[in-house]
Image (spheres, rainbow, N blue to C red):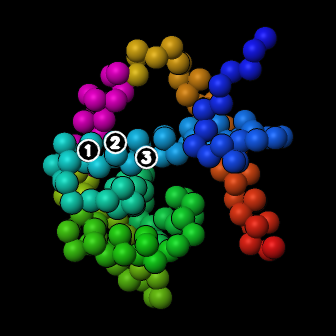
């Protein structure tokens, strides 16, 4: 059986043992950029073209379950190490009146405003129409998608561990 062509972004990383990881990484690069492009275009169609992908993620996370969240909660749930980027996003979302902040002791808590909730709902409607409805064209079940999600979360843990190892060199 002939070897299939390796689809990678960096051939020098795809030689020798573990070359398959380079194929996964190229898939992640393409998916990451496609997802970012999708989020900004979906949000623009929902009515706001001024948000970056990070700001969109932060808005949805603050809106998640209708619970007030702190900066640290948001960073933890989104697996973002650079809290200053999330803090900047929060300040912009507050200025845009999409979220509200409340200081309690030394902590600041964030929640979506009525306008933020409405924007999240508009995003959900566009997502349903443009993405979810088209997913029926794939031969993937809900269980398949949950398995992919689980694998991606496990893979992220492997990259987190490797980044800690690299930081100790």
Q: Is label 3 or label 2 in front?
A: 3
Foreground pick, 168 / 131? 168
The residue at the point 57 percent across, 43 percent down is 9
Where is residue 165? Give x, y as percent.
79, 66
Q: Quadrant of residue 103?
A: bottom left
Magenta span:
120-134
Q: Is label 3 or label 1 in front?
A: 3
Label 3: which residue?
Answer: 33
The residue at the point 35 percent across, 21 percent down is 134
Question: Was residue 92 drawn as part of the magenta stretch in this picture?
Answer: no
Q: Secondary structure at mark 3?
A: helix
Q: Residue 133, can we see it?
A: yes
Where is residue 100? Give x, y as percent.
28, 71
Label 2: which residue?
Answer: 38
Q: Secondary structure at mark 1?
A: helix
Left/right placement of residue 63 relative to residue 6 reads: left
Q: CA distance from mark 3 to mark 1?
A: 12 Å
Tell me whether the residue at label 3 lies in contact with that at label 1, contact meaning CB atoms closer than 8 angstroms.
Answer: no
The residue at the point 34 percent across, 30 percent down is 131
Q: Residue furthest top?
A: 1
> Quick one: quadrant of the N terminus?
top right
Tell me whether the residue at label 2 lies in contact with that at label 1, contact meaning CB atoms closer than 8 angstroms.
Answer: yes
Q: CA distance from mark 3 to mark 2?
A: 8 Å
Where is residue 96? Give x, y as percent.
20, 68
């Amino acid at each position: 059986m002939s070897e299939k062509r390796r689809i990678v972004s960096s051939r020098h990383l795809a030689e020798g043992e573990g070359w398959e990881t380079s194929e996964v990484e190229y898939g992640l690069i393409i998916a990451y950029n496609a997802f970012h492009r999708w989020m900004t275009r979906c949000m623009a169609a929902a009515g706001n073209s001024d948000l970056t992908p990070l700001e969109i993620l932060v808005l949805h996370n603050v809106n998640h379950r209708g619970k007030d969240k702190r900066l640290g909660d948001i960073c933890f749930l989104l697996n973002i190490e650079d809290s200053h980027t999330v803090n900047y996003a929060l300040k912009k979302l507050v200025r845009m009146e999409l979220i509200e902040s409340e200081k309690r002791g030394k902590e600041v808590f964030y929640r979506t405003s009525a306008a933020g909730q409405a924007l999240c709902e508009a995003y959900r409607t566009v997502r349903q129409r443009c993405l979810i409805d088209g997913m029926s064209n794939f031969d993937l079940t809900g269980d398949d998608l949950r398995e992919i999600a689980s694998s991606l979360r496990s893979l992220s843990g492997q990259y987190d561990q490797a980044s800690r190892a690299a930081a100790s060199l």
